[in-house]
Every structure is written in structure tokens, then in C-alpha cells.
Amino acid sequence: WAHIALHADDQLRQKMAWSLSQIVAVGLPGSGTVFNEETEHYLAFYDMFTNHAFGNYLDLMKEFSFNVIMGGWLSFKGNTALQYNIEEEGKDSFPDENFAREIMQLFSLGLYQMNIDGSMIL
């Protein structure tokens, strides 16, 4: 990875991919979420940033939202709908809404409304 990032002909793409990977972070060892022996998944996750370096952020969000690494980190892997829980399991437990909240809060809208100059709307 380091050799490609430092010596590839597409330096701007590599820098954009690195920047995007810092914005869309997933669990790392020591954070409580460790993906042992899933190196290939991490490589595919990083490749998304390289592929979408000059693209639309919405397209990138759609792709990383359904990645297996993000599925584990945002706890939507194995999540079921309320109707499924009622019909199949006989319980009315509500689905985990962490995924939707995290996507909106961390990767798109943020916590606060902002003015065009970056100051918070009070």
C-alpha cells in the first residue's frame, strides 16, 4: 500500500482516497471492534475510496453502507425488521436503528445545522 500511495502515477487519486478513508473510519484493533483475519475486507473497503476519489459522495456512501466491514461496525449485519420479528420470532423487538443514525450523524448531516460560513445555527 505505501509503495502505491507514494509512487503511483495517480498521486491526486491516492491523496483523495487517503483523505476519504480518514472521514469514513471503521473500527480498528483496540477500539472494541476487531475484524480478525479479514484483511481482504479492509482492502476492498479502502479500494472504494480509490474508485470514488473523484466521484459523488452519495455514490460512495451507498457503496460503503453495504460493505461487510461497515455492516459489522454499524451493527446492521443480522438486523431484522419489526414485522419479521413479530411474524417469525413471535416477539415485538424493534430493529436496531444505529445504522441510520450513524450514517446521518457521522457521514452526512452531522450533529448541528450550519450556516454557509461554517458557523452553527443557534
Image (cartoon, rainbow, N blue to C red):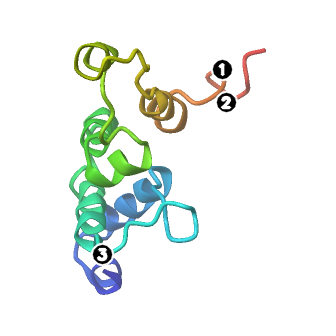
Label 1 to label 3: alpha-carbon separation: 44 Å
Which residue ends up furthest to the right in the rendered image?
Answer: 122
Q: Residues within 10 Å of mark 3 (few under 14, many from 20)?
A: few
The answer to whether mark 1 and mark 3 are in CB contact below 8 A is no
Residue at horizontal 48%, vertical 59%?
Answer: 27
Q: Position of residue 2 (x, y in %)?
A: 35, 83
Q: Which residue is mark 3?
A: 37
Q: What amino acid is at disc 1?
A: Asn
Question: Can you tell which of label 1 and label 3 is closer to the viewer?
Answer: 3
Give residue 115's mark: 1
| Residue type highlighted by circle 3 | Glu
Q: Residues within 10 Å of mark 2 (few under 14, many from 20)?
A: few
Q: Quadrant of residue 59?
A: top left
Secondary structure found at label 1? loop
Instruction: Label 3: state its secondary structure.
Output: loop
Task: Report, in whole angstroms, how far the alpha carbon at label 1 lies from the one at label 2.
Answer: 5 Å
How many numbered marks appear? 3
Q: Which residue is mark 2?
A: 118
Name the residue rendered at 28%, 23% in the picture.
Answer: 89
- Residue 73 lies, in percent from the top left, at 43, 50
Label 1 environment density (alpha carbons within 10 Å; few <14, some 14–19, many ≥20): few
Question: Could you tell whether 35 is left or right of 122 in the image?
Answer: left
Q: Residue at 36% across / 38% down in the picture?
A: 76
Depth order, front residue of 8/72:
72
What's under tag 2, amino acid-wise? Gly
Task: From the viewer's perspective, tell me whether residue 99 is left or right of residue 41.
Answer: right
